[in-house]
Amino acid sequence: MRTMIHIVAPVAMFLLVNCAGCGSSSPPPPRDFSLSVSPSAISMTVGTGGPAVGITVSGQNGFADTVSVAIAGLPPGAFSSPPSPLTIPPFGTQQVTLFMPPATPTGSLSVELTATSGTLSHSAALALTVAPVSDTAVLQEASGQVAADTIEIQGVSAGSFNPIYWQRETLNWMPDTRVPMFTALTSSPNQNIYAPWALEQQAGWRMFYGGWDGSDSPNDRVYSVTTSDFLSFDNRTLVIDHGAFEHVNNVNVQQLPDGSLHMMCTAGAYDQLNWPAYFSSPDGLTWNASPAPYQAQLGDIVDIQGYSDYPHGGFNAGNVLFRDNNSWTFYFYDNNNPNGGIYRATGSSPQTVQFQGIALATGHDPNGVEKFMVDSQPWYLMGLMSNAPQLWYSLSNNGITFGPEQTLFDNLSSLDTSMVSVGFVRKGNQLLGALYGANPGSPANTLAANQIYARWLQKKVVITDSSGVQYLAQGGYGPGRQWFQGSSSRTLEGTMVVYAEDGITPLGSSLVTITAGKAYTLILQ
């Protein structure tokens, strides 16, 4: 009898194996986009334009079409800029501002944003609060000569130092209308000046600076002038002559309660090395026991004990002397040690200091340090530069280590492309502005083009007329004055909103009628 053997299982297995990839695959996800608005809620004063709102489209799954965004729900007479509907690319953000006319009812409302592309549609909502005019910021006519097509508003200086404003990095820096603010004497072709340092005095400031300033030779020296308002300058004086050095510059000065002045500078020797040098005066007239101008000597070089690289260092542009807690602190940058940063040394005398360690890891030079007390908490502010079209600052709560650098401001034009120094202007617990030296950056002989420029930290004033046209300050004129371009009719009527020096914190508003050719004083009630 013949045995029949049926081989079934392997065939079944074969079929199962060959069917593992059978069947239809899942369709790809459809192309789409999302819509978002940031911030999702804003507040604004009636009769004004609101803060900018970002409307963002984000394509998904290969979506590559433009999107049309319509804005609905605005009250009568209100409009957006740019006008609705908006056209936004598949991966893009459009900044939009809204204007609420003076007759707009105050209160809360919801603005609907609808985005469409073909058959696709998405929406988002913007919560809007319209506040009434508060009448807490008013203008009073003031005396003074003002150009016929200009409106001047006085009393706009920054308030007491507020670290929250500085941390936001939104400060309202107003360029001085004089470009540059302070120029060298023209008594010779040697007209290079920079490194300004404003030392507060009882009747204003004494501004020190370095450079040539019309001297008979291109050797940097230290000069000073006095000013009550940074509009007029008097007592132009040569303070420190270069003496045994090729140049003496990068000046900063501390004043003690007894009236004595203590100055740190860069002293450049003919062997191409630069050293920190210290000069002192009991009265601002006599320096290192000699009547001004004092002839700088090799013995004025500071001794930094414990810093092993000191004999071969390069200490140009970054030497800051600071008096704190009855002791001297010296911040310095060694250009010959690019892997270092800003170092800190301390001592009972500025002439001899003991190396402590690094204060800030950076490749930028320190130009000045200021200390403010805010709610019994110390805040230290350091200004930094790097011959770049930008300046920086850093904050600290102890003066020992400083936090990440933030941008102070960028250059204005081709005239100040290379910003070579920065010094702050303060009045008590207010920081009113920043002075800086700068030149065009090219050609190579730009030293002859250094002059002194100014930015003023001021309150932000925005005036909006009934048609939604905004008028912003065109520039500052000293620390407490702003200039506006007048309207074609000479008289400007509208709603004024005043913000703090951070540019975003509202302080007050009012209805105003102002005329070109006149000055007004801002009063916050």
Image (tube, grey):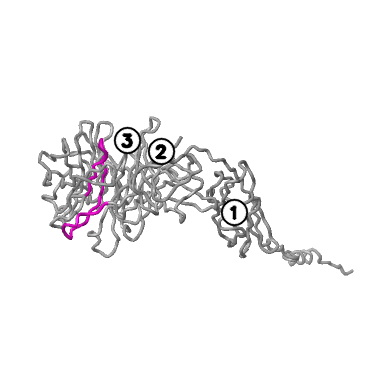
Q: Nearer the viewer, residue 408 or 317?
A: 408
Name the element at disc 2: loop
Q: Amino acid at mark 3?
A: Gly
Disc 3 crowd rating (10 Å Cα; few below 14, some 14-19, many 20+) is: few
Residue 48 placement (x, y as % from top left): 53, 48
Marked residue nearer the N-terminal end (2 or 3): 2
Q: Nearer the viewer, residue 116 or 298?
A: 116
Residue at mark 1 to residue at mark 3: CA–CA distance: 44 Å
Q: Which mark is residue 428?
A: 3
Marked residue nearer the N-terminal end (2 or 1): 1
Q: Amino acid at mark 1?
A: Phe
Q: Looking at the image, is 460 positioned above or below residue 524?
A: below
Marked residue nearer the N-terminal end (1 or 3): 1
Q: Which mark is residue 37?
A: none
Q: Amino acid at mark 2?
A: Asn
Q: Residue at x 74, y 67 (%)?
A: 18
Q: Which mark is residue 79?
A: 1
Q: Looking at the image, is 291 positioned above or below residue 412?
A: above
Indicate whether residue 186 is drawn in magenta: yes
Residue 297, visible in the rendered structure: no
Q: Nearer the viewer, mark 2 or mark 1?
A: 1
Residue 34 placement (x, y as % from top left): 63, 56
Residue at mark 2 to residue at mark 3: CA–CA distance: 13 Å
In the image: residue 198, left or right of residue 476: left
Indicate whether residue 109 is drawn in magenta: no
Residue 100 placement (x, y as % from top left): 58, 48
In this picture, which residue range is highlighted in magenta? Answer: 182-209
In the image: residue 134, left or right of residue 453: right
Determine which residue is flagged by label 2.
162
Residue at mark 2 to residue at mark 1: CA–CA distance: 35 Å
Residue 454, visible in the rendered structure: yes
